[in-house]
């Protein structure tokens, strides 16, 4: 690999104009294409200290051997040129936000003499109208099957059409009135084209006029006592309504829009888009791609560029709704408007029906990312590869078949809790998860536990976990002698992962070493750059961002964080709803409500005298004294045990 300094251009050579740049490797292949408002500013950012660059960016500049640029007049031209070059060179460091599969469309070949409705994939052809995309081809066939009752247009291939013309006999659809049979001359080309145009108008959202027209015809046939014709028209109306039911109405004003939503983590982003035409959701598509080093606005910008780059005309809707605006939203809007031939509104919906639909698309994106993670985690080959990579990259003595991950959660040092999650063979073992209430070491002046930081809390949690392991491992076959139940901490992990950087890792390692355990490895996963820290090392281990090993560590870290924060919220919620009246001996729920009704707050109850408390129904002299003592912290009067003559402090005994 060449060091960037060997091919770095002098700053004075780089123009400040907008343009597009290309990085090439030593073999002359284009490895990255980008655009910039100012070429000098953007290119200079690539040639700073390697240690300050994102790992993916550092890999790219190290793999490069030269950089070249092309100056353009406007940012819109830069968008067009960048899209062309990405499509031409397919650079390996450019993330592709278009899925590799081809979604099916309902296509009507209006460029032919006798237009044909069919399922079509791949590149769009000139003179053909497209509707969709659909998730499955069978959904298009179901739609066609219903719509052909009302719009009997041709669906056969050119060979079938030609053969029917030669023999003078239509296909089966012609006999059951689902095709107007232009092949045998039942209708001429002009009549058949009108049928195809009506079908396109119906699919484009102008459905109401066709339903109303059929209703008028049905009523007229009924008035003329042509009941068989009226029944056929009734069935046709039902067929159109079934077609409409398959596409939900989301906007009442006939809006044409594409609604995008993203769900992302450190490595991947799930994209979902709903295609709304005529106020109805006509299609949906989604995919998961690598996010790499891009921010969400950059992802949105590249996504729109790649999705619409090869489109034109009606394929670009009047509105494009996105979760966040891209950095160059004005130039992107101009570019989209140029593709469509009229204004395209690129914006973020803030309220109303469009915001509601955006939330629905966001839920679909989140579920898509979750399904992708589960599917990837369930792949035995990927799990085996992940464990092997961790063993090699972290230089472990054996494959970490059991991995435990620990996390600490608190708010400004209060309600500190810890979590332990367990993965065995790359899969979570939720029955082995454990939660810890961090007690802290020592008491403050007021008797409360001293507030501790993350490292002290991590040390305590690891100490408690492995101290219990040392105790449980001596039990026969890992079972308690008295109950016969499996002991909780009898099995040690091969690898301990903590959520944090070097301080947390050192605290965890120190806790394990203090207990004399030497066969457990410890690492930490820091969230900022996803680097892996090893105790005693000044520099982290950087795993490849696309590696299965890093993906497994991230799943562990995220699961431990989820488990810890859920427990912390439960304790915080319980602490906020607890009352000082709870736990007072002899004070049940009814009497607590009576006290609060009488005085209005615990503060007033604490300030009340015993005589005031006696006025509350159900409160006697002895209970009033207990309430005062518990709320004010006053010591109880010592009592004498008549059997032994011993003086007993009941309050102290109860607290002990």
Image: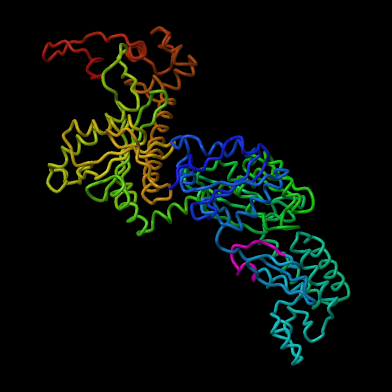
Task: Please state, as top left, top right, bottom left or bottom right, where the C terminus lies in the image.
Answer: top left
**Quarter where residue 394 is shown:** top left
Residue 153 lies in quadrant = bottom right
Q: Nearer the viewer, residue 10 or 180?
A: 10
Residue nearest the viewer, comparing 560 with 87: 87
Which x, y percent locates residue 627? Answer: 36, 14
Q: Is residue 219 left or right of residue 368?
A: right
Give left or right: position of 132 versus 532.
Answer: right
Residue at 74% x, 92% y is 167
Going 32% across and 18% down the picture, which residue do you hit?
A: 450
Q: Which stretch is magenta? A: 130-142
| Residue 556 shown left or right of residue 255 in the figure | left
**Residue 602 pos. (x, y %):** 44, 16
The stretch drawn in magenta includes residue 137: yes
Q: Is residue 323 above or below residue 212?
A: above
Q: Is residue 403 above or below residue 209?
A: above
Q: Nearer the viewer, residue 492 or 343?
A: 343
Residue farthest along the bottom direction in this orientation: 167
Image location of residue 506, percent across then percent down: 28, 31
Residue 391 magenta: no
Across the whole image, how many numbered discs are drawn on residues?
A: 0
Q: Position of residue 301 (x, y in %)?
A: 63, 45
Q: Nearest the camera: 6 or 412?
A: 6
On screen, residue 321 above or below 153: above
């Amino acid at each position: 690999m060449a060091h960037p300094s060997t091919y770095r251009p002098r700053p004075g050579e780089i123009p400040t104009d907008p343009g597009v740049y290309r990085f090439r490797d030593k073999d002359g292949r284009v490895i990255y294409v980008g655009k910039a408002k100012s070429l000098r500013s953007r290119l200079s950012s690539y040639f700073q200290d390697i240690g300050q660059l994102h790992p993916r960016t550092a890999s790219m500049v190290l793999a490069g051997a030269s950089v070249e640029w092309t100056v353009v007049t406007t940012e819109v031209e830069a968008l067009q040129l960048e899209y062309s070059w990405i499509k031409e060179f397919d650079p390996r460091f450019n993330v592709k936000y278009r899925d590799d599969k081809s979604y099916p469309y309902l296509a009507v070949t209006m460029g032919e003499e006798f237009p044909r409705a069919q399922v079509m994939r791949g590149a769009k052809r000139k003179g053909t109208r497209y509707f969709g995309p659909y998730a499955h081809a069978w959904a298009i066939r179901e739609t066609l099957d219903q719509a052909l009752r009302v719009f009997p247009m041709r669906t056969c291939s050119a060979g079938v059409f030609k053969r029917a013309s030669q023999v003078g006999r239509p296909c089966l659809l012609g006999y059951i009135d689902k095709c107007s049979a232009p092949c045998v001359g039942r209708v001429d080309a002009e009549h058949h084209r009108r049928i195809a145009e009506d079908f396109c108008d119906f699919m484009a959202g102008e459905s109401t006029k066709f339903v109303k027209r059929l209703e008028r015809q049905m009523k007229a046939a009924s008035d003329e006592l042509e009941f068989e014709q009226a029944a056929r028209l009734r069935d046709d109306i039902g067929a159109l309504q079934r077609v409409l039911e398959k596409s939900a109405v989301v906007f009442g004003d006939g809006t044409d829009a594409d609604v995008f939503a993203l769900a992302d983590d450190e490595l991947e982003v799930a994209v979902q888009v709903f295609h709304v035409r005529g106020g109805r959701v006509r299609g949906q598509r989604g995919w998961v791609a690598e996010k790499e080093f891009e921010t969400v606005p950059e992802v949105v910008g590249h996504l729109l560029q790649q999705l619409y780059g090869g489109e034109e005309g009606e394929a670009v809707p009047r509105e494009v709704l996105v979760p966040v605006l891209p950095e160059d939203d004005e130039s992107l809007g101009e570019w989209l408007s140029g593709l469509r031939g009229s204004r395209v509104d690129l914006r973020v919906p803030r309220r109303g029906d469009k915001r509601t639909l955006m939330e629905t698309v966001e839920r679909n994106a989140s579920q898509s990312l979750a399904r992708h993670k589960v599917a990837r985690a369930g792949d035995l080959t990927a799990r085996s590869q992940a464990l092997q990579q961790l063993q090699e990259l972290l230089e472990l003595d054996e494959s970490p078949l059991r991995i435990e991950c620990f996390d600490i959660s608190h708010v400004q040092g209060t309600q500190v809790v810890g979590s332990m999650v367990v993965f065995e063979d790359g899969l979570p073992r939720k029955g082995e998860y454990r939660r810890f209430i961090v007690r802290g070491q020592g008491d403050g002046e007021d008797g409360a536990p001293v507030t501790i930081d993350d490292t002290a809390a991590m040390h305590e949690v690891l100490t408690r976990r492995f101290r219990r392991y040392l105790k449980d491992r001596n039990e026969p076959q890992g079972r308690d002698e008295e109950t016969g139940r499996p002991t909780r901490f009898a099995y040690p992990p091969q690898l301990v992962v903590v959520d944090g950087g070097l301080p947390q890792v050192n605290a965890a390692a120190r806790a394990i070493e203090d207990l004399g355990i030497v066969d457990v490895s410890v690492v930490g996963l820091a969230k900022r750059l996803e680097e892996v820290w090893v105790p005693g090392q000044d520099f982290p281990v950087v795993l490849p961002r696309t590696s299965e090993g890093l993906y497994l560590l991230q799943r562990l870290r995220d699961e431990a964080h989820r488990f810890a924060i859920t427990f912390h919220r439960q304790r915080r919620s319980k602490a906020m709803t607890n009352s000082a009246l709870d736990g007072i001996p002899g004070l049940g729920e009814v009497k607590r409500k009576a006290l609060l009704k009488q005085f209005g707050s615990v503060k007033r109850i604490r300030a009340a005298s015993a005589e005031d408390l006696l006025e509350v129904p159900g409160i006697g002299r002895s209970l009033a004294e207990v309430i005062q003592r518990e709320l004010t912290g006053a010591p109880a009067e010592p009592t004498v045990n008549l059997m032994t003559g011993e003086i007993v402090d009941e309050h102290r005994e109860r607290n002990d």
